[in-house]
Amino acid sequence: MALRQSITKRLMLARYLFSQSKDAVASNREVATFAAINLLQDAIEIFFLAAADHLNVELNRRTEFDQYLDKIGEKLAEPLPFRHRLIEINKVRVLSKHNGIPPNRTELTGYVEDARQFFEDACEKLFGNSFWTISLIDLLPMGETRQFVSAAEKYFNEREYHKCLVECRKAIFVEIEQDYVIDQFAYGDTNILIAAMCKAPSHTKNKRFIDENVRDPFDYIRLDHSRVDAELLRDGIEPEIFWNIWRLTPSVYRAQSIFMGGEPSLFSIKHDLERYDEDAAEPNAAYVLEHTIDILLKKAKTRSSFRKMEADTNFVSKPKNGKAFKVYRKADKGSEVVGEVPGTAERVMLKYWTPGLKDGFFWRVSYMDGLEGGMGPGVDIVFSGYADENDLDHGK
């Protein structure tokens, strides 16, 4: 059963505050220890509020910290774990906040570790989900990347950490890396639209470069590091997190067969022995899974913030009465003709409608010959310009 939105938000906040507490501890600054213990206690208390909401526990504004444990425990067959340790954390927090006594740094590290175990154990017991992934996947839009991280979460819970890493890398490939795949240039000249859509460095998008530099399928991925970093920063993602994931996960590759008019092919996976470190498997998988989901969420948020006119059926037209027509460089029938759309064309893409430079009205259009339900092998005519509105079967 899906959790209510109020519970979901509190659990996300608890996880965020816990993450901030860990960062404060890692800074090794005395002043940060005060922040760390307060953030840690706040994370625990927010978690209690989520649990109380989920179990319909009645609380009031004067509920004391240890009373949360009692009231929530009354609804459970077994008490919550780490009771004494959690109460100790609260006492240290009171001393730091009200008396200015800094927490012992060694003890603080132990508090953070015990709190982590509490969150993991209690979350499974109360909500039946992993503390690290609860709710986040549900916020992702439906699609391939959501399927991959859902599979990754399943493998993580089954302690199949290497498979978890592979599924996370598949999501990263689809979200970021596939835009830098150059396999479609391996057979010679390629349509200019496809070349423009590929984000790989320009000097890599040709048969000669591929013949000289691609030695295995994974060499088809040619990241432009500066561009990757710039787009990550635009989306509010720290580039070092992405590159950490990139280094910790096995490389994957999928041929861009969509450009050849087919369905996406199966993934190839590089079996890199350096990725089979059993001692680091669990923490690496936890790190990668958490941050992969975060990257996907931020990417989705960026896309949703852009207001676009998608090229769907509302912005596609055909030649009126099946008659061929000319497309002009300017909104002027006296300007240069850049191409002619045949009367049999099924899809003429419309951008906007505008008055002409001298008279009449025009549509800004794009036409790609051979575009049947997507990009096919016959796409060899691409042009855009202005068409007389009377030539198109579409009103303004």
Image (spheres, grey):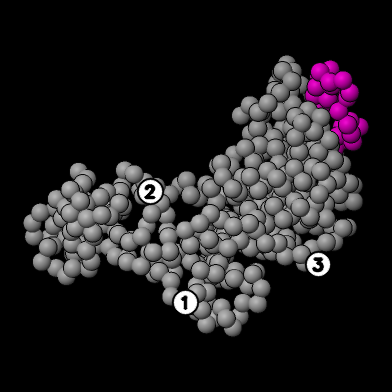
Mark 2–mark 1 Cα distance, whole angstroms, equals: 31 Å
Q: Are marks 3 and 1 in contact (CB under 8 Å)?
A: no
Mark 3–mark 2 Cα distance, whole angstroms, equals: 43 Å
Instruction: Kindly identify the residue that appears in the image at 89 percent across and 34 percent down.
Output: 82
Q: Amino acid at mark 3?
A: Glu
Q: Amino acid at mark 2?
A: Glu
Q: Which residue is mark 2?
A: 310
Q: Quadrant of residue 117?
A: top right
Return the x and y of residue 131 as percentages of the image width and height: 75, 39
Tell whether 373 sits left or right of 234: left
Q: Quadrant where the N terminus lies?
A: top right
Q: Is residue 120 visible?
A: yes
Q: Which residue is mark 3?
A: 274
What is the magenta range? 65-90
> How packed is label 2: few (under 14 Cα within 10 Å), some, or many (20 or more)?
few
Considering every residue shown, the one lying at the far left of the view is: 359
Q: Which residue is mark 1?
A: 188
- The foreground one among 191 and 31 is 191
Q: Is residue 34 visible?
A: no
Mark 3–mark 1 Cα distance, whole angstroms, equals: 35 Å
